[in-house]
Amino acid sequence: MTMNFGFHLPTRIEFAAGLLSQTGKLISRIFAGNKVLVVTDRGIQNSGICDQVVCSLKEQAFDITVFDRVEPNPKDRDCEAGSKLARQISADIIVAVGGGSVIDSAKAIALLKTREKPLSSYTGSGKITGKITAIAAIPTTAGTGSEVTRSAVITDTKRNVKMTIKDVLLAPKLALVDPETTCSLPAELTASTGMDALVHAVEAYTCKKANPLSDALALAAVEKIYPALPVAVRDGSNKLARNDLMNGSLMAGLAFSHADVGSVHCMAEAVGSLYDTPHGVANSMFLPVVTAFNAGHDPERHARIASICGLAANKLDPKKASENLVEQLDRLSNEISIPHFSELDRVNPADFEYLAEISAANGSTPSNCRPVTKNDYLRLFKDCYNRRR
Ligand SMILES: [Fe+2]
C-alpha cells in the first residue's frame, strides 16, 4: 500500500547541553524586535532557570517583562491576562520558559495578543488567519514536545473542558533545547513527564494518521526514552539519561504533531479538565490499559515497539510480544511510582459516564488505531480504576 503525506517543519531546533546561556545571542540572531515577554511559572522562577534566560537576554539589550502566572493544566483566564500584558508592552517576541503548560500558554498568549475573539473560537484545526507574535520555546521538562508542536491545549474554565487549538501558525519559531534544564527536576515530575513523552511516541506510531516519517521519529523516540526514563528518575543528575530523555521527547513531539495521539490522551485530557490532574500523570495511568485495548487490533505495530524496548526476542509471535509490552508498561509505571487512578484526589466512579462522553468527543478519538466508542471508554475507565498492578 502506498501512502501520501505532508511533513512541514516550521520550527528551527537548537539542541545542546549548556545552551541556556546562549539564549540572548540566539534570539537576537533569529528574531526581529527588542521587546520580549517571558512566559513562565512560579516554580521555574524559583528554580533560577528563568533568571538565567533573563540574564542572557539582558546581555543582548532586550527589553524584558516577565509573566509568571501559568498554572498546570493552563487556564484561558491566565492566557487572557498574559495577552493583555503582551499588548501593553507591545511585545515583539514571546519567550516561553517551562514545561508544556507554559509553552502552550505562550502560544495562546501570542494568538490572543492581536485578536479580540475568545480563545474558544479557535478550537479545532486551522482556524487561525493572519500573523502571530513570534515564539521561542525553552522546555524545562522532557515530556510535552510542545516546543516543536503546532497545538496548544488550554482549559476553558467556564465549561471545564480542554480546548485543543491546532494550527501551524502556533508552532514556535525557535526551540532552544538544553537537557541540563531538567537536571534539577524532581523524580516525580521526571517520571510523569517522561511517560507523557513515551505516550506521544507510542500513540504517534500506532495511530491511524501515522506516516513513514512520523514512524521513524516515534520509534527513535521510544529507543531513547524507554531505557533512559527509570535511570533519570533514580538519578536525576545522570546527564546521559537526561540528554536521551530530552532528545526522545523532542522526537516524540515531532512525531505526534505530524501524526496524532490516540485514546490515552483523550482519557487524560478528560481527567485533567475535571480533576486538574497533571497531564503527564493522567497519561501515565492510562497507557497500560489503552495499550492492552489496542494491542490485539494491531499486534504487528505493538510488537515492533516491544522489540525496540528489548521485550520481543527474534521471531516472537506479535501477539505475545504485544502482551509483553503491556505487562512491561505496567511494571515501568510501578518502578517509577506513577500513582494508581483510584489513588487520585477527587476521583469518583460516578463521574466515569461523563469522562467517557468527553473522551469520545475528543478530536483525537477517531485517530486511535482501534475504533473506540463511549462505552469502550467507560469500560477503560472502570478497568483502570479496578486494575491492580
Ligand atoms: Fe501529551
Image: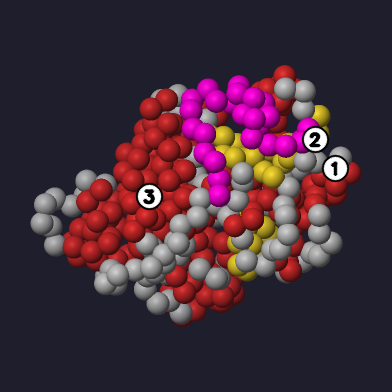
Q: Residue at x 18, y 63 (%)?
A: 318
Q: What segment carries the magenta color?
A: 10-37
Q: Inspect this view and state whether residue 131 appears.
A: yes
Q: Residue at x 20, y 58 (%)?
A: 321
Q: Residue drawn at (67%, 26%), measured in percent from left and top?
A: 24
User: Residue at 38% of width from left, 68% of height from top?
Assistant: 4
Q: Residues within 10 Å of mark 1 (few under 14, many from 20)?
A: some
- The amino acid type of the residue labelled 1 equals Ser
Helix, strand or loop at mark 1:
loop
Q: Which residue is mark 1?
A: 90
For marks 3 and 2, the one nearer the N-term is 2
Q: Position of residue 168 (x, y in %)?
A: 59, 57
- Viewer-proximal residue among 69 and 364: 364
Q: Which residue is mark 3?
A: 217
Q: Secondary structure at mark 3?
A: helix
Q: Is residue 230 above or below residue 331?
A: above
What is the quadrant of residue 243 in the picture?
top left
CB of mark 2 within 8 Å of CB of mark 1? yes
